[in-house]
Image: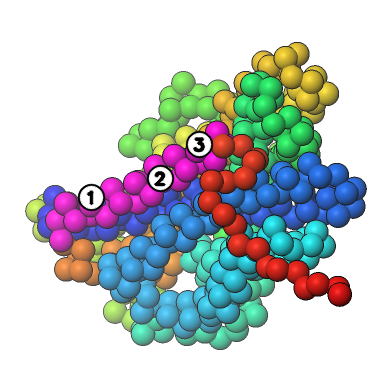
């Protein structure tokens, strides 16, 4: 491996691991923020003290996750500037326009978190509910901005591409990107599921131990309802997102489904995809399932998609090739660097084949990740249906111990499914950073990341440490229970009526 290739591997590894660790806290905070709003609303409507006590208890976990999420997010900004200047320069106008939204929202969000966490005990129920709703809306708006930027990288719209990068033509078109709408809806649904199972796991532990039963019971009721609504929404929006991928990124969709040729109408439920021979070993297939999945004729297979990429590369090498084909010429040059030792002896047809295959993402990884995500979604739906059926027995304690165990055991699964979906979205876009316009190899500057393994390992170790601290803090909060914490909270003195 050349020094340039090794530097690229380090850059991708560091950013991928950093983004994955950060992304563990994003869906949790969004899910908990919605749960807190509903708990405060239930307290306002019913006056039952257990709802207010539950909201105060779960807000502690929210603040902890929000602080760690914020701390793990800043290294990503630094990495973009330090290691990926090619991407920043190329997408500068779109980044500045879309991310300006976050600049407006971040101070408001910080203020709301501080007020609710430090002064919440002194505020009235309706005030806490109003502030909780404002915080939820601010978080959703921030997430929508970031996801819109990611969707633009998957399906770039609203810009014109020039030699200096993407030039913003219509910000409205960027936000109206249908790929963004599906991504936002799917991510928010997954966040609801993550927050619900986090609550259900802790409540299930209390019910099994017979501790803090009032808070555990109301948390269980809310968690089951939220989880069911979230998992149904996630499964539906996931299907719609997959159809959108089939329309705009057919090669990625074909890789997700190990769909090799257009003529094959079977839906592969499970197999061992072999990218070298372009066949599926030990395949379990549903005949005519592909047409049913997409609601029409089977989409292009990987063989046809690679052939289309080969044609694009061939056209890009013509002397009079338009500038829009320049990224494909870059893919040809990347293949030349990768096979530098043999390149002079290869025929032009072989060179084109090697370059076209670089346009194909890693089929086994995408195929397995997509199925892992879907399988977890179906399994969680089954567990939630069981919990809904036995909710009264769960609240009573001992008769529902087995179901409570499953709720606790399933707590990590939403995170695993979320990260699997993240792998599908990001690795499925490779070798592009901006699909069809900017190659990953063009987005990084090797000299900026050629710093060796140990500095990268040190930064990643710091992020892992933050994750461990969150886990320790969450366990400590759970063991303390809903009672007062060992440090005093700020209280605003109320004016006398005399």
Query: Residue at image x 27%, y 55%?
Result: 459
Please provide percent x and percent y for residue 278. 40, 36
Q: Are marks 1 and 2 in contact (CB under 8 Å)?
A: no
Q: Which residues are magenta?
A: 451-479
* Residue 462 highlighted magenta (yes or no): yes
Q: Is residue 232 above or below residue 279?
A: below
x then y, percent, for residue 94: 50, 79
Depth-wise, is mark 1 or mark 2 nearer the camera? Answer: 2
| Secondary structure state at the residue bearing disc 1 | helix
Seen from this angle, which residue lies furthest top? Answer: 399
The image shows residue 484, relative to residue 152, as above or below, that is above
Q: SS at mark 2?
A: helix
Is residue 112 located in the magenta-colored stretch of the structure?
no
Residue at image mark 1: 457
- The residue depicted at 75 percent of the width and 69 percent of the height is 494
Q: Please give the residue where the numbered disc 3 appears in the rendered image.
A: 475
Residue 49, position as x, y percentages in the image: 81, 45
Q: Residue at x 38, y 49 (%)?
A: 466
**Quarter of the image holding residue 324?**
bottom left
| Viewer-side residue, 475 vs 426 | 475
Question: Is 285 left, or right, of 128 in this rendering?
Answer: left
Q: CA distance from mark 1 to mark 2?
A: 18 Å
């Amino acid at each position: 491996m050349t020094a340039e290739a090794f530097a690229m591997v380090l850059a991708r590894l560091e950013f991928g691991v950093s983004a994955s660790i950060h992304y563990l806290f994003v869906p949790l905070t969004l899910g908990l923020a919605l749960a807190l709003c509903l708990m405060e609303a239930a307290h306002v409507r019913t006056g039952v003290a257990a709802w207010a006590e539950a909201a105060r208890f779960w807000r502690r976990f929210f603040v902890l996750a929000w602080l760690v999420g914020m701390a793990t997010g800043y290294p990503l900004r630094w990495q973009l500037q330090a290691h990926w200047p090619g991407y920043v320069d190329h997408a500068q106008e779109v980044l500045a326009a879309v991310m300006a939204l976050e600049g407006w929202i971040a101070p408001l969000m910080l203020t709301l978190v501080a007020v609710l966490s430090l002064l919440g005990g002194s505020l009235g129920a309706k005030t806490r509910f109003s502030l909780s709703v404002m915080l939820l809306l601010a978080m959703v708006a921030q997430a929508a901005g970031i996801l819109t930027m990611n969707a633009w990288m998957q399906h770039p719209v609203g810009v014109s591409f020039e030699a200096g990068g993407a030039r913003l033509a219509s910000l409205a078109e960027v936000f109206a990107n249908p790929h963004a709408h599906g991504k936002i809806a799917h991510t928010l649904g997954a966040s609801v599921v993550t927050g619900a199972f986090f609550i259900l796991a802790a409540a299930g532990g209390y019910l099994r131990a017979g501790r803090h039963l009032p808070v555990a019971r109301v948390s269980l009721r809310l968690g089951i309802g939220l989880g069911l609504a979230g998992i149904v929404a996630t499964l539906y929006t996931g299907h719609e997102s997959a159809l959108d991928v089939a329309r705009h990124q057919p090669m990625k969709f074909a890789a997700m489904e190990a769909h090799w040729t257009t003529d094959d109408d079977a839906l592969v439920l499970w197999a061992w995809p072999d990218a070298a021979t372009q066949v599926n070993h030990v395949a379990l297939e549903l005949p005519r399932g592909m047409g049913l999945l997409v609601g029409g004729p089977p989409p292009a297979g990987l063989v046809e998609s690679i052939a289309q990429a080969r044609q694009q590369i061939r056209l890009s090498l013509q002397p009079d090739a338009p500038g829009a084909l320049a990224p494909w010429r870059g893919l040809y040059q990347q293949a030349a660097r990768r096979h530098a030792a043999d390149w002079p002896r290869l025929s032009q047809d072989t060179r084109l084949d090697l370059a076209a295959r670089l346009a194909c993402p890693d089929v086994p990884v995408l195929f397995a990740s997509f199925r892992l995500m879907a399988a977890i979604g179906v399994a969680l739906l089954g567990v939630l249906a069981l919990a809904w059926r036995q909710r009264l027995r769960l609240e009573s304690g001992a008769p529902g111990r087995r179901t409570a165990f499953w709720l606790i055991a399933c707590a990590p699964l939403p995170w695993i499914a979320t990260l699997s979906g993240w792998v599908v979205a990001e690795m499925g876009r490779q070798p592009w950073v901006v699909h069809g316009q900017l190659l990953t190899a063009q987005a990084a500057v090797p000299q900026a990341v050629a710093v060796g393994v140990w500095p990268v390992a040190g930064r990643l170790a710091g992020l892992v440490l933050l994750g461990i601290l969150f886990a320790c803090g969450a366990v400590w909060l759970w063991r303390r229970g809903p009672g007062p914490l060992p440090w005093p909270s700020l209280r605003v003195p109320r004016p006398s009526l005399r």
